[in-house]
Structures are given as structure tokens and as C-alpha cells.
Image (cartoon, rainbow, N blue to C red):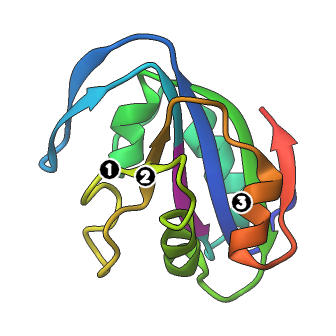
Amino acid sequence: MKSKSGTYALVLRSYASTRTRIGRWGWLDVRPGYYIYVGSALGPGGVLARVSRHCREHKTKHWHIDYLRELTSPVSVWYSYSPTRLEHSWAEAITKLNEFEPVKGFGCSDCDCNSHLFFSASEPELPGFAAVVQGSVKSTEL
């Protein structure tokens, strides 16, 4: 990854069932399986800085994903470099894939999206995702 502006989909794995409070958003029942969180990194440090922050274990909780990240392990990140904010179109595209279930209201308090977090019982695969977002998407294992 590079320190360039872009959009990313962080793939996380949960190994256990638990319930956690996500800041002021509310309670989330975390299930064993995979979560995909979609975001943009248009500021200083770009995709590399944002994903690195998400992967750190100890940090100040700022975003909804910071709370979920405490209970999950990073698996990979799918990303694309562009100064255009694509997170909303990526989130919309993911809703078209049958294996993904949106977590209503998560990570999208500043937009009109249904969700920026999606759950899948099985490990998601890049080719299906790349096909629905219709762009050049790269992948890095974490």
C-alpha cells in the first residue's frame, strides 16, 4: 500500500460470539465470521495511514470501526487509489452480493448509506467484490 488517497474495504474476522457497545451508536451482536468495513482515506497519509491505524490494537476510539476492531482480527484490505470518495458506491455495490448482510447504520452516520459494515459467514473473495465495484482493486494480506 502507498500513502495515496483512496478507498478501502477492510476485511476482519471474528472468532466468537459477543456483544459490544459501539460508542453512542449502540450495541452490536458480533458473530463468528467475517466483517467488511468500507471507508475512504483522502487525507494525509492516505490508504496506508488509515489502514495502519485500523490495524493497531491500542488507539483512541474515534470511529465505529475502532470498537469492532478490538474484537476482530484483520485479514486483508482491498483498496483503490483515487482522490474521489468511492466508499458510498462501494457500500452500495456490496449490498448486491448475496453473501453480505449489512449492519444497518454502522459507519455511516455522516451519509445516506444504509451501512458501511457488512457481515459474511464465509470468507469473502476479492474477484466478486471487484466485479461489483467495477474498478481496479488491489489486495494486501494483513
Badge 2 element: strand
User: Which of the numbered marks, if any, corresponds to residue 116?
Assistant: none
**Residue that mark 2 sits on:** 117
Magenta residue check for 38: yes
- Please report the residue visible at 35 percent of the width from the left and 62 percent of the height from the top: 115
**Residue that mark 3 sits on:** 129
Kindly indicate the quadrant of the structure image that contains residue 104: bottom left
> In the displayed structure, would residue 47 be above or below residue 70?
below
Q: Where is residue 29 in the image (x, y as percent from the top left)?
A: 24, 28
Amino acid tagged 2: Leu
Q: Position of residue 66 (x, y in %)?
A: 40, 40
**Residue interval drawn in magenta:** 36-40
Amino acid tagged 3: Phe
Cβ–Cβ under 8 Å for marks 2 and 3: no
Name the magenta segment's main secondary structure.
strand
Check the picture and name the quadrant holding the N terminus: bottom right
Badge 1 element: loop
Magenta residue check for 142: no
State how far apart marks 1 and 2 are (Cα): 6 Å
Check the picture and name the quadrant holding the C terminus: top right
**Relative to 76, is 139 on the left or the right?**
right
**Residue that mark 1 sits on:** 103
Amino acid tagged 1: Val
**Relative to 11, is 17 on the left or the right?**
left
> In the displayed structure, would residue 78 be above or below residue 123?
below
